[in-house]
Amino acid sequence: MINKEDARHLVETTVPFIQRAGLRAPVMERGRVVTTMPLAGNTNHIGIMYAGALFSVGEVTGGAMFLTSFDADKYYPVIKDMHIRFRRPATTDVHVEVRMDEQEIARAEQEAATKGKADYVLQGNIIDEKGEVVAIMTGTYQLRAMGT
């Protein structure tokens, strides 16, 4: 497994858009990830957070979860599907937390080891600094064995 600081660095810097947007991953633990997105630099034409920034703060959680919970020497992640429901305008920085229990991690690893791939689903509320849910995200990610 990759160490937390290297994983955080990869999440925050590998994709140029994510780096420019200022996304951070302050919590990266096995089975638990928190990502944040600043409002500054990510507003749209009416001064609220751009929908693409909200989408990104949710979507990146799947890659971050992969880095904290799976063996990058054996597997790699891809996103299969992403849904986001926008509930209210985001006028502050936002964060999202996703979790994956040990049973689900083990199931995905076992399935990917035997079938070459396995889906895992992450759900989370994207929350502003006032504690309001501004969007709800559901991402279906796929763990793939190297060479598939």
Image (cartoon, rainbow, N blue to C red):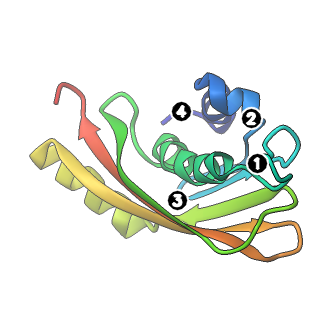
Q: Name the residue under label 4.
A: 2
Q: Earlier in the sequence, mark 1 or mark 2?
A: 2
Q: Position of residue 125 (x, y in %)?
A: 63, 71
Find out whether the residues at labels 4 and 3 contact each other: C-beta distance under 8 Å. Answer: no
Element under disc 1: strand
Find out whether the residues at labels 4 and 2 contact each other: C-beta distance under 8 Å. Answer: no
Inspect the image, locate mark 1, and give the three-letter code of the amino acid beneath it.
Met
Inspect the image, locate mark 4, and give the three-letter code of the amino acid beneath it.
Ile
Q: Residues within 10 Å of mark 2 (few under 14, many from 20)?
A: some
Which residue occupies 78% across, 58% down?
94
Element under disc 3: loop
| Residue at mark 4 to residue at mark 3: CA–CA distance | 14 Å
Q: Earlier in the sequence, mark 3 or mark 1?
A: 3
Which residue occupies 83% across, 47% down?
38
Question: Which of labels 4 and 1 is toward the front?
Answer: 1
Quadrant of the image occupied by residue 102: bottom left
Q: Where is residue 117 in the image (x, y as percent from the top left)?
A: 20, 45
| Residue at mark 4 to residue at mark 2: CA–CA distance | 24 Å
Q: Mark 2 points at which residue?
A: 21
Q: Mark 1 points at which residue?
A: 37
